[in-house]
Amino acid sequence: MAKGKDVRVTIILECTSCVRNDIKKESAGISRYITQKNRHNTPSRLEFRKFCPYCYKHTIHGEIKK
C-alpha cells in the first residue's frame, strides 16, 4: 500500500543575499533552514522571508536542490 514517492518531502531554504555576497567574501557563511513541504499542494519552489544571522536582517530564503 505504500507509494513509491512520499507526499511530504524535506527541503532546504538558503539565503539568496548570502549566496550573492559569497563571491565578494563579505559574509562569514550561508544561512540555511530545513523544513518540509507537501509535494502535491506546492509543486513550485518555496521562498520565505527568514532571519539571516550572517546578514543580521530578514532576507528571502529560497528552496535549493539537494
Image (cartoon, helix red, strand yellow):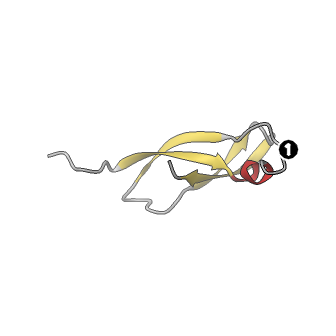
Question: How many numbered markers are drawn?
Answer: 1
Which quadrant of the view contains residue 43? bottom left
Question: Please, which residue is most extreme toward the left here?
Answer: 1
Give the residue furthest to the bottom: 44
Residue 26, position in %: x, y? 85, 44
Image coordinates of residue 6 in percent, x first then y, are 31, 48
Crowding at dot 1, Cα within 10 Å, few <14 / some 14-19 / many 20+, comes out as few
At x 70%, y 53%, the residue is: 16
| 50 with respect to 13 (left or right) | right
| Residue 51 shown left or right of residue 6 in the figure | right
Q: With respect to residue 31, does 38 lie above or below?
A: below
Measuring 29% from the left and 51% from the top, which residue is drawn there?
5
Give x and y (percent) for residue 58.
75, 46
Instruction: Work out whether residue 34 or residue 66 is closer to the camera in this orientation and state it.
Output: 66
User: In the image, 59: left or right of 2?
Assistant: right
Which residue is identified by label 1?
26
SS class, disc 1:
loop
What's the residue type where badge 1 is placed? Answer: Glu
Q: Position of residue 14 (x, y in %)?
A: 63, 47
Name the residue at 79% across, 44% down. Answer: 57
Tell me if 19 is positioned left or right of 46 in this view: right
Name the residue nearer the viewer: 13 or 57. 13
Q: Quadrant of residue 29?
A: top right
